[in-house]
Image (cartoon, rainbow, N blue to C red):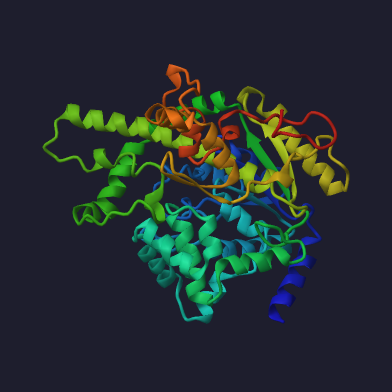
Amino acid sequence: MMAASSVSVRCVLRRATVPSLVVILGATGTGKSKLAIEVGKRLKGEIISADSMQVYQGLDIITNKVTAEERAQCRHHMISFVDPLMSSYTVVDFRNKALALIDDMHSRNKLPIIVGGTNYYIESLLWRVLLDTGQENKDHGVTGEQAGDRKVELERLEGAELHKRLAKVDPKMAAMLHPNDKRKIARSLQIHEKTGVPHSLWLEEQREQEGGDGLGGPLRYPDACIFWLHADLEALDKRLDGRVDEMLSAGLIQELRHFHIRYNQQKVQDESQDYQHGIFQSIGFKEFHDFLTAPESSSQQEKDQLRDKGIEALKIATKRYARKQNKWVRNRFLTRPGDNIPAVYGLDVTDVSRWEETVLNPALQILSCLRKGEEPAVGPIRAQGAEQRNKRSRHSCDLCDKVIIGDLEWTAHLKSKKHHYHLRKKGKSDPSCGLSQIPIPAEEIPSEDTGAAGAERRGETSQDSSADTRTAQTNGPVDLLNP
C-alpha cells in the first residue's frame, strides 16, 4: 500500500515538470557536465551526478569532478559524499538516494538533470526492476556492507568455479554468462542466495510485466528526454589525450601519490590491494601502480620511465573506456527491444568551436518544444534492427579454445584473423580436412589488437570501432546506427 501511494505521489509531482527528467549521456570527454550546467542555469534545473567514482571523497582530478566554480553556477548532488574506504556502495544505494532527490526537485518545480558516464546508474533510474536487492537485504537482515563483502568474497574465486556453482542453481543464467565474467556470475549467485529464486526466473517475470522488455521493467519516467553527446572517434581520441595532459598539469601525479600514501600504501605492503572495488577501480590507480610502488632506491630515470609508462597506459585506458561507454549506449538505449524507451536525441560534439550551434542551441530548442507540447524540429534517433538484438547464446570454438557468449560476438570471431589463422594452421597439419586452401594475407596473421579479433578480445563487435553517428538536421526520426 505504501509503495502504491509513493508511486502516485511521484506521478502527481511530475506533472508540473515536462519533461520530468533530462538525461545527458555520452563518452568521457564529450562535455556532458558543460551542457548540464548550461541547461540547468536556463531552465531552473539541478544536476544529479550519475558517476560511480564521483560519489567518493577525494581524487577530484582523476575522477574529473566539476570544480567549485562550476558547482556554484548550478546546484549539484551526489558528489563526494561516500568515504573512500567504503567498497560496498551499490547501484541500489545510488538509485534510492537519487529517486528521493528527483521527487524533491519535482516538489520544488525544479528540472532534474542526470549527467554522468556510469550508464547502469542511469538505467536504474529510468527503468523499474522487479527485484529490489536493497529491500531483499533489509528483509533478510543483511546490511549493504555485508552484501558487498559477500560479493567480494565470491569474486575472489576462480571464474570456472563460480560458473560451475551458478550452473548448478541457475543453468539458464550460466548459459548466458561467460566464465570470465565474475562480477555478473557473483551477482546472479547472490540473488539466488538471498531469494531462493534463480536470477533467470526473476528476469523472465520482469519481461512479462506491462511495459517490460528483455532488459528491464517498465519506464519510471515515460516523458524523460535523453541527449546523447557523440563525436568523431579521431577527434575524441585527440581530445582525451589532451584531457590527460590537462590533468597532469592540474596535479594528477601529486593527487595519486597523496591518496596512495594515505589509503593504499599499507594494503600494497600487505599484498591486499584491490583495484576492482570502490574508488580504487578508478582509471589511474592500476595504470600508475608500478610508479606509485617503486622502491625509494629507484633512480630518477627509472621513476621517470615508470611515470611515462603510467601516462601512456592512462591515455589508452581512457580511450578504451570511452568506447565502452558508447557501446553501452548503443546496446542498452539505441537497440533496446520494445517501445519502453524515452526519446534519445543525438548531439554532435566533434567541433568544439561550434558548440553553441551544434550542441547547446539544439538541446534548448528540443526542450523548449517538449515543454510546450510541440514536436521538436530535430527528431530523435531511431535505431534500426533492434528486433535483431544480439542473443546471449553460448558458443565454443574448439579450434581457438575459446568460449564466446553472444551471436554477434560469435559471428565476429568466425570472421576474425585469429580464427582464420587457426583454420589455415589446422588445414596444413591435416590436409584431409580441406582447410589449407583458405587464403589469408600475410599481414593478417594474427593480431589480437586490431580488426575483429581485437574487437572480440575487448568485448566489442566490428560496429563499435567505427565512428557511426551523426546529428539529425531534419524533422523525424534519424538512424545513427546505419549511416
> How far across and down, in percent of the image, does residue 288 sit?
31, 39
Q: Is residue 279 left or right of residue 371?
A: left
Residue depicted at x 45% and y 38%: 457
* Near-viewer residue (246 or 314): 314
* Near-viewer residue (431 or 215): 431
> How far across and down, in percent of the image, does residue 123 sit?
62, 55
* Near-viewer residue (417 or 327): 417
Q: Quadrant of the N terminus?
A: bottom right
The residue positioned farthest toward the top in the image shown = 442
* Residue 247 in view, yes or no: no
Report how many numbered discs are placed on residues in the image.
0
> How far across and down, in percent of the image, does residue 312 sit?
36, 30
* Residue 139 in view, yes or no: yes
Q: Is residue 325 left or right of residue 110?
A: left
**Position of 54 relative to 187 (above/below):** above
Q: Is residue 470 left or right of residue 235?
A: right
Q: Is residue 358 left or right of residue 253?
A: right
**Position of 481 relative to 293 (above/below):** above
> How far across and down, in percent of the image, does residue 40 sit?
67, 46
Residue depicted at x 36% and y 33%: 313
Image quadrant of residue 329? top right
The residue positioned farthest toward the left in the image shown = 297
The residue positioned farthest toward the front in the image shown = 432
Image quadrant of residue 231? top right
